[in-house]
Each structure stands twice: as structure tokens, then as C-alpha cells.
Amino acid sequence: MNQNLLTYLTDIKNQIIDIATQKGMNASGKTLSSIEIIETPKGYDLQASPSIYFMEHGRGPTHPGTPAGNPNLVEVIQDWLDAKGINANPYAIAKAIHKNGTKLYRSGGNSGILSVPLNLDRLDQVFNDISAEYLNNTAQAVFDEIKL
């Protein structure tokens, strides 16, 4: 598998963890520990818990008729409060979030946890490097075959 892609994805994973930690968004560590690089037949995938989306964008208000999550928001908030060592009413916090969304969401939802590491210019450079490597390998294989 391509070492450039693996290096790139490892760097992104580490940047996400570093930015979240620097911003104090790592309470229990569950979301960040869910980030993993999976080898696939065609290369690699960077995967994480769906909750990582909320670290970048925040959580919007709950729409009427939306089914409860599993775990529900009160349970998620209680886990967060426990991890942070905060004594507060998780029901009151959940009610406020259901009504208004989180502070991050209300402020525009761009924490940089995902958007900074997933910079398109960097991605373009990595793919240019990978395509150049494949072109060189293919050209070398063709020339080696002609020499025979």
C-alpha cells in the first residue's frame, strides 16, 4: 500500500487529536480514541465515531419528532460531566441544547478540529505525490519490459 497516503492519514489523525486536546474538547477521550486508519484493498480509510462531527460543528437544536438517540442526550451529557468532574444537572443542559443547540453550533460551528487538518491544498499535494510515484513505477516497469 502507498506509504505517502498512510503517512498523510497518520498526520491527519494526530492533528485532529492535538487540536481537540489543545481546545479542551477531549473530555472522556472516547471520540478521539475512535479515530483509526483501516487498510482496505484499495488503500486506507480514516474512520471515527460519528460524534466527531459535533466536535467540528456543534449540535443544533432538536427538531420536533426526532427520535431519541442511543445513548440519549442526557446520558451523553452525564458522561461528559463525569469526565470533566463537573457537578451540574444534565437534564437542564440537555433541555437547553434541545432548544438552542450548543454554543459551538450557535457561533457558526467551525472549531477547526477537522477543517484544519483536512486542508484541500495539502490533500492535493499528497495526491500529486502519489500519482507521480505511480507514474514513475509504471514507466520503470514499461522500460524494464522493453529492455528484455
Image (cartoon, grey):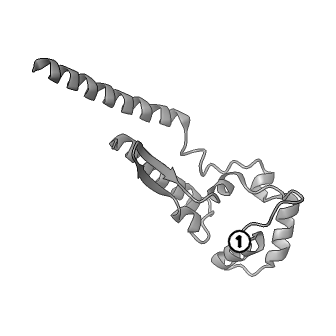
Where, quadrant-wise, is the N terminus in this rendering?
top left
Q: Is residue 7 left or right of residue 21?
A: left
Where residue 71 appears, as percent x and y from the top left, is 71, 71
Q: Is residue 72 left or right of residue 32?
A: right
Residue in the image at 32% along x and 31% along y: 133
Q: Is residue 90 above or below residue 141?
A: below
Return the residue nearer the eye: 124 or 146: 146
User: In which quadrant of the rendered view does residue 143 lie?
Assistant: top left
Where, quadrant-wise, is the C terminus in this rendering?
top left
User: In which quadrant of the rendered view does residue 66 lie?
Assistant: bottom right
Return the residue nearer the eye: 96 or 18: 96
Q: Is residue 42 left or right of residue 19?
A: left
Residue in the image at 21% along x and 25% along y: 140
Dot 1 amino acid type: Pro
User: Which residue position holds label 1?
Assistant: 71
Q: Is residue 84 above or below residue 139?
A: below
Decide: few, some or many residues near mark 1? Use Cα within 10 Å; few <14, some 14-19, many ≥20.
Answer: few
Q: How many marks?
A: 1
Secondary structure at numbered mark 1: loop
Residue in the image at 71% along x and 69% along y: 70
Where residue 24 appears, as percent x and y from the top left, is 62, 64
Where residue 54 appears, as percent x and y from the top left, is 69, 56
